[in-house]
Amino acid sequence: MRKLTGLSIPLHRVKTEKHSQYKGVIGVVSDFLTPPAGKVDPRRQALRFANANHELFKLPEPAMSKSAAPEPVAEIQPEHVARSPVGYHVQLQQSYEGIPIYGSQAIVHMTKDRSIYFYTSDLYPEAPPVEMGKSGLLTAEQALEALATVLPWKGRLDREPHAEQVYLPHEDTMHLAWCIDLSLAAQAPIMDGQDRSSDWRALVDAESGAVLELLDVTLYAYSWGRVFYPNPVVELRQESLAWDAPIPASAYRKLRLARLDGSGFLCGPYADTAQTPSRVQQTDGQFIFERSQSGFLEVMAYYHVDQVVAWVRRQGFGDLFSTTPPLSINVRAPLGDNSKFLPKSWALQFGAGKVMDAEDASIILHELGHAIQEAQVPDWATAKRNSPVRAMGEGFGDWLATLFFAEKRRAFHPTYVGDWDARGYATPRTYLRRVDTDKTMANWKNEEHADGEIWSAALWDLYLKLGGDSDSAATRLQARGTAAKLVLTSHLYLSDGRRDTLTYAHGLDALLTADRFTGPDPTQPGVHEQMIRDVFAKRGITV
Ligand SMILES: [Zn+2]
């Protein structure tokens, strides 16, 4: 680094880079340090530096700007000062006859004691042509009107647009233009990204009305939500937690809400809380609620449905929910302490209770399980009540709810469903159902939820045998993915008109087919054939 005795830079002794756009102009100067200048105003120091190097920076001679020269001159003024641990960073804005030259800025970087060590420049090297016409220019209103043909802003303005005249270097010539900043409100219904609220900057030629540049300057921030993952009993590992106990902050997780459509509602491609009365709207995307606040249940439903659908899609079912509208969700449905999936309305409804159903992610996932099956196999849900195929659906929902959270639940309630929801029953219970009962076909009751426990227990055993009982987290995660792939594929072999006559044995057969065709060689039995047969034989299910 070259220590200088003054502010003037000896070009041949320091590091320079040419301007990326303008020939003969220096873009970057570094590897130097000017003497300290005490407590002088950083803006003033930056101007002094620019004046001392005006030839290098292609600026007019400093004396000219001080004299009462009749000729207009390009000038620079400090526009913005940023502070950092190093010192000050002064942005100089170039203007011409008081009109800023768009994008024409330089930054002078100095230490706390005003030693300058770095200069970067986007200054426009020449003054605009003086003969540039000034008569017949568009007013700001006319420029806005011209903009409407490219950006349909009418009826959507969020606030008064801001318009400023600038010189715009554009395609080798200098244009007098209107720089317009405008904010558009979201346009309901949100059909795509263009309907979102957004901020725009437009540069409209002040002579021709042509839109020279149009930029979407919106910074799409992440949206966040606060949820139970999956519920406070599991998060706190507190067996004694009562439904009305105070819930500490540590029972919540703040997680990113993905795929929101920008409307401020909890609406994305897989889930939409549209059916919820007085649904919550947060235009800043921050859905940070507690259990006691009405928005909380909606965040639970949106987050868990969205993340599980995204996960299933990643397991090889990439078009799941692609052709369906988002599930329409009501988290405060008048159902009593009950929840349901409505296949024809394509809706999830979660009921009330001392613990609201949507406060427990395992309940959300159970209902989502029904929707996933329906998306895979249309009319799955129209099978006869208490038929084996319906019971398989109940078992699958329970299994999905425990499988998805298998890591989180490891060593604490690994096989429970509804272990928070059940705290709020008239007679509080430890769980609603579980996926590790010792039920077999001998226990068949002709009640789809009870009989579903036979199916879910077989599926849970399958996950454990695939590696879910391993001490290695990597092995367990792989087992989780393999199990999901096999079971979800098997549903597709149950899609014909036999629905009402299908038995658990048909379900087993479908799993064996899935194993064969997801394996390396479909002409051979599947890799896991014996394992699958064994876990189902334990439940009295054979083919
Ligand atoms: Zn169910």
Image (tube, helix red, strand yellow):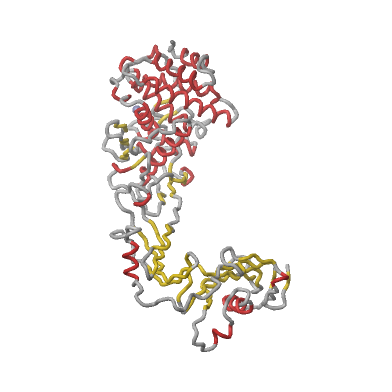
Judge by depth and name the residue closer to the eye, 514 or 137: 137
**Which image quarter: residue 99?**
bottom left
Q: Is residue 481 left or right of residue 362?
A: right
Is there any visible trace of residue 529 in the rendered image? no
Observer-nearest residue: 171 or 169? 171
Left or right side of 307 for 380: left
Seen at 45% across and 50% down, the residue is 222
Does residue 237 appear in this view? yes
Q: Indicate the quadrant containing the C terminus: top left, top right, bottom left or bottom right.
A: top left
Report whether 458 appears left or right of 384.
Answer: right
Q: As displayed, is residue 504 above or below residue 281?
A: above
Task: Report the residue at 28% width, 24% height from top.
Answer: 382
Percent across and percent down for residue 6 are: 69, 78
Q: Position of residue 266 (x, y in %)?
A: 36, 46
Residue at the extreme bottom: 68
In the rendered image, the vertical position of residue 418 relative to residue 98, given as above or below:
above
What residue is rendered at 73% in x and 67% in y? 1
Which of the four quarters of the rendered structure image does ligand 1 lie in? top left
Residue 241: x %, y % from top left = 44, 37
